Image (spheres, coloured by chain):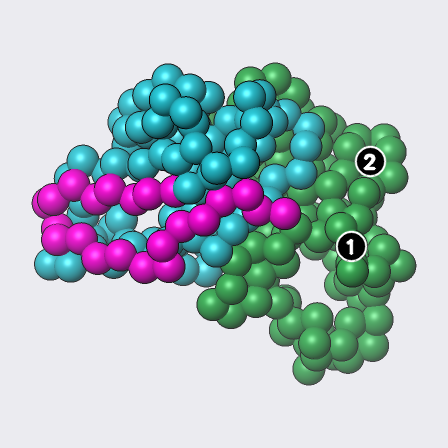
């Protein structure tokens, strides 16, 4: 089945630094990728939708200058958390969609801890 | 925003069928019903989806009411590994945002 790879699975960084998370679709071309954030015991919250070659569409309340999304190719999207703070500590999950009649496939998430 | 409501939690005895309900009373004609599950600290796993007909695959069955305002996910013989949070999502087939509701936490009891 379709596989979405997310890297790194876990990262710890110091407050004020930036962290990049990669999301790759391994066996299909993803025309659309989605980025989610999940806090403990809560559901997934959609942060932004990115289409290959165009700017990401951010959900209300998500700071686009803080969470930079790049979808440069049909198999790779990146999320950069800039100037991270402890409140950005969360579980970040990406998903990818192939154009056509197919469901979304999710990566296994990245646990970000900002100290 | 999520357009579904689900019970927050359910228990099911191991080996029995788990029936997870979902209400989506405002679903529109071109929106599909998707089911995913999330095991702790992992990404969501696709289970099944459908438009208006009942669907079955190797994991589960999806029963959609005739008016499409509700659906039920059926795990025919629940195992301990089926303990997870199950999410019901409605969405047009491709390209639109994919919003998660609060889901149902299913616990399979030995």
Residue B8: x, y in percent? 37, 59
Judging from the image, mark 1 belongs to the subunit labelled A
Q: Which residue is mark 2?
A: A72
Q: Which residue is mark 1?
A: A60
Residue A99: x, y in percent? 65, 20
Q: What's the residue at 74%, 47% (across, down)? A: A48
Q: What's the residue at 61%, 67% (across, down)? A: A90
Between B104 and A64, the one lying in front of the other is: B104
Q: Say what secondary structure mark 1 lies in.
A: loop
Tell whether position B28 is magenta.
no
Circle 2 packing at 10 Å, graded few (<14), some (14-19), many (20+), is: some
Relative horizontal placement of residue A104, taking residue B97 as reference (left or right): left
Q: What's the mark number on residue B17?
A: none
Note whether residue B71 is visible.
yes
Q: What's the residue at 58%, 61% (across, down)? A: A38
Circle 1 packing at 10 Å, graded few (<14), some (14-19), many (20+), is: few
Between A52 and B7, the one lying in front of the other is: B7
Which sits earlier in the primary sequence, circle 2 or circle 1? 1
Residue segment shown in magenta = B1-22
Residue B95: x, y in percent? 68, 28
Tell whether position B20 is magenta.
yes
Note whether residue A6 is visible.
no
Q: What's the residue at 57%, 67% (across, down)? A: A39
Judging from the image, mark 2 belongs to the subunit labelled A
Q: Say what secondary structure mark 2 lies in.
A: strand
The quadrant where residue B54 appears = top left
> From what the image shows, is residue B87 above or below residue A15?
above
Residue B31: x, y in percent? 55, 26
Q: Which chain is green?
A: A
Q: Colour of chain B?
A: cyan
């Amino acid at each position: 089945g379709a596989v979405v790879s997310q890297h790194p699975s876990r990262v710890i960084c110091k407050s004020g630094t930036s962290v990049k998370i990669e999301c790759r679709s391994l066996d299909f071309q993803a025309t659309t990728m989605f980025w989610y954030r999940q806090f403990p015991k809560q559901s997934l919250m959609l942060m932004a939708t990115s289409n290959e070659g165009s700017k990401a569409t951010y959900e209300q309340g998500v700071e686009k200058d803080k969470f930079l999304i790049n979808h440069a190719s049909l198999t790779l999207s990146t999320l950069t958390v800039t100037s991270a703070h402890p409140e950005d500590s969360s579980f970040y999950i990406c998903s990818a969609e192939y154009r056509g009649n197919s469901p979304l496939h999710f990566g296994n998430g990245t646990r970000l801890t900002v100290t | 925003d999520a357009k579904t409501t689900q019970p927050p939690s359910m228990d099911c005895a191991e080996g029995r069928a788990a029936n997870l309900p979902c209400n989506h009373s405002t679903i529109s004609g071109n929106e599909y019903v998707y089911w995913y599950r999330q095991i702790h600290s992992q990404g969501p796993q696709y289970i099944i989806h459908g438009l208006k007909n009942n669907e079955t695959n190797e994991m589960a069955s999806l029963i959609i009411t005739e008016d499409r305002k509700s659906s039920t996910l059926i795990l025919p013989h629940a195992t301990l590994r089926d303990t997870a949070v199950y999410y019901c999502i409605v969405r047009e087939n491709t390209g639109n945002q994919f919003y998660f509701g609060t889901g149902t936490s299913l616990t399979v009891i030995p």
